[in-house]
Image (cartoon, rainbow, N blue to C red):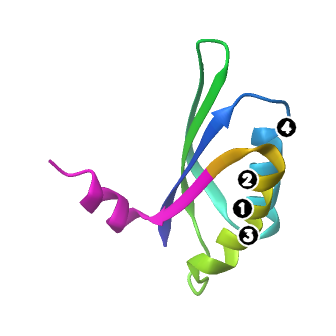
Amino acid sequence: MRAILSVIGKDKKGIIALVSTTLCKNDINILDISQTIMQDEYFTMVMMVELPKNMVMQKINAPLQEIAKELGVEIRIQHEDIFNSMHRM
């Protein structure tokens, strides 16, 4: 199953490292990634990821929310179909 993961918050060291390490530990492959620093202060990242076939989204959401709290950022993960439905004009 593919999902869209987004991270938004104040820039700080280790955001990409912690998120990608958590994904790897849970056998989640990063298919595509886009990240930028806006006005030298705000970090934004969007990833398309591939979850193992039988993985429930809540299994990865819990450790991602721990990272979000630790870093003071917002992390969201959504099934690709839900993301597409929400952003269709």
Q: Is residue 43 left or right of residue 76?
A: right
Q: Is residue 51 magenta?
A: no
Q: Of label 4 and label 2, which has the lower sequence position?
A: 4
Closest to the observer, 26 or 13: 13
Q: What percent of the width, then of the height, locates residue 17?
A: 82, 43
Q: Are marks 2 and 3 in contact (CB under 8 Å)?
A: no
Q: Is residue 88 magenta?
A: yes
- Identify the residue at the far left of this view: 89
Task: Give the residue type that dot 2 points to.
Answer: Ala
Q: Dot 4, how many residues are within 10 Å of its Cα: few (below 14), some (14-19), or many (20+)?
A: few
Task: Give the residue type that dot 1 points to.
Answer: Leu
Q: Dot 3, how many residues are within 10 Å of its Cα: few (below 14), some (14-19), or many (20+)?
A: few
Q: Dot 1, how many residues are within 10 Å of its Cα: few (below 14), some (14-19), or many (20+)?
A: many
Q: Residue at x 73, y 28 (%)?
A: 11
Q: Residue at x 20, y 52 (%)?
A: 88
Q: Quadrant of residue 72?
A: top right
Q: Are marks 1 and 2 in contact (CB under 8 Å)?
A: yes
Range shown magenta: 75-89
Closest to the observer, 18 or 71: 71
Residue 44 higher or lower than 89, as above or below = above
Q: Mark 1: which secondary structure?
A: helix
Residue position marked by numbered label 1 in the rendering: 64
Residue position marked by numbered label 4 in the rendering: 14
Q: Which mark is residue 27?
A: 3
Q: Of label 4 and label 1, which has the lower sequence position?
A: 4
Residue position marked by numbered label 2 in the rendering: 68
Closest to the observer, 77 or 52: 77
